[in-house]
Image: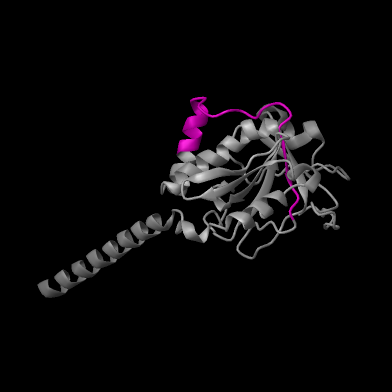
């Protein structure tokens, strides 16, 4: 009888330990994959970053590429815009593809957004490359915002996301060609009603399902063509 009790106790201990080790392993995997999986050749990344906006804008923009120490200027521009290919860790923290190496989204920020909104890309990237977990990145971002250590979006902040090759998930799916407008948080009252977003036939989209901690409201305006001028799918409300 004693032997049976001991055996049952040992079984329970092994089960508990297995659960602990599984949790530890899962937590350990909640960090960036090998950086090589996210990197592109500099020339390919420069061209991809430029595809975020029409050539009339992006050909004179500053271009930044991701390297082992974060983003660095590859080509200096003259018009105040900054084009960059963001990686998966810039998505909402609840996104299932937060660490996917296949998520690559070209964005071209105007001068106001490059001075303020883009700072969050640099900060998240810095933490990701340092090995921070998703929950650590979120907590540190929220703490920095609360301490006023990160900027609020500058007036007139906006960005282009018009690349037909944008990849938002592991399947490589693109969203609609669009521009983004960054507004102060209080302008999001009534789920975008202040902009008439998501109303019948309104071209303005406000998606509150994936709330980000960043101190702004982002409105999306889908457009009917990609940055190269070819037709893009018309927005269907998805």
Q: Is residue 34 magenta?
A: no
Image-based side of 46 in relation to 134, left or right: right
Residue 106 lies, with reference to residue 199, above or below; the image says: below
**Part of the protein shown in magenta:** 140-163
Question: Is residue 2 in sight in this rendering?
Answer: yes
The quadrant in which residue 5 appears is bottom left
Q: Is residue 72 above or below residue 224?
A: above
Q: Is residue 18 above or below residue 126?
A: below
Q: Position of residue 161 (x, y in %)?
A: 72, 48
x and y, in percent, of residue 89 in the image:
54, 49
Q: Is residue 16 left or right of residue 156?
A: left
Horizontal side of residue 74 vs 204, given as left or right: left
Nearer to me, 206 or 165: 165
Most foreground residue, 199 or 125: 125
Q: Kindly identify the residue that appears in the image at 81 percent across and 41 percent down.
A: 204
Q: Where is residue 171 shown, x and y percent of the image?
A: 64, 65
Q: Which color scheme does this rendered protein use? A: one colour
184 sits to left or right of 66: right
Q: Nearer the viewer, residue 167 or 206?
A: 167
Q: Nearer the viewer, residue 195 or 154?
A: 154
Toward which corner of the image does residue 159 lie, by quadrant? top right
- Whether residue 220 is visible here, answered yes or no, is no
Image label count: 0
Q: In the image, what residue occupies the spot 41% across and 46% down? A: 130
For image coordinates 60% across by 32% down, the residue present is 215
Instruction: Give the vertical position of 174 relative to 76 (above or below).
Output: below
Which quadrant of the rendered structure holds the C terminus?
bottom right
Q: Quadrant of the N terminus?
A: bottom left
Residue 135 horizontal/vertical position (percent): 45, 45
- Indicate whether residue 143 is drawn in magenta: yes
Q: Residue furthest left?
A: 2
């Amino acid at each position: 009888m004693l032997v049976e009790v001991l055996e049952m106790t040992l079984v329970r201990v092994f089960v508990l330990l297995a659960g602990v080790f599984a949790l530890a392993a899962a937590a350990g995997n909640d960090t960036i994959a090998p950086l090589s999986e996210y990197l592109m050749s500099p020339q390919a990344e420069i061209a991809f970053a430029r595809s975020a906006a029409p050539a009339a804008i992006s050909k004179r923009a500053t271009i930044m590429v991701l390297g082992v120490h974060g983003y660095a200027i590859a080509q200096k521009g003259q018009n105040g815009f900054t084009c960059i290919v963001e990686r998966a860790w810039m998505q909402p923290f609840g996104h299932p593809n937060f660490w996917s190496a296949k998520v690559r989204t070209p964005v071209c920020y105007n001068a106001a957004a490059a001075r303020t909104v883009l700072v969050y890309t640099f900060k998240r990237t810095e933490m990701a490359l340092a090995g921070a977990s998703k929950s650590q990145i979120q907590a540190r971002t929220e703490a920095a915002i609360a301490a006023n250590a990160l900027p609020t979006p500058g007036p007139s902040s906006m960005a282009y996301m018009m690349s037909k090759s944008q990849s938002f998930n592991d399947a490589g799916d693109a969203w609609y060609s669009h521009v983004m407008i960054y507004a102060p948080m209080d302008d999001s009252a009534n789920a975008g009603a202040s902009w008439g977003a998501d109303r019948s036939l309104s071209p303005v989209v406000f998606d509150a399902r994936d709330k980000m901690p960043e101190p702004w409201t982002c409105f999306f305006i889908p457009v009917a063509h990609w940055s190269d001028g070819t037709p893009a799918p018309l927005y269907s409300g998805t």
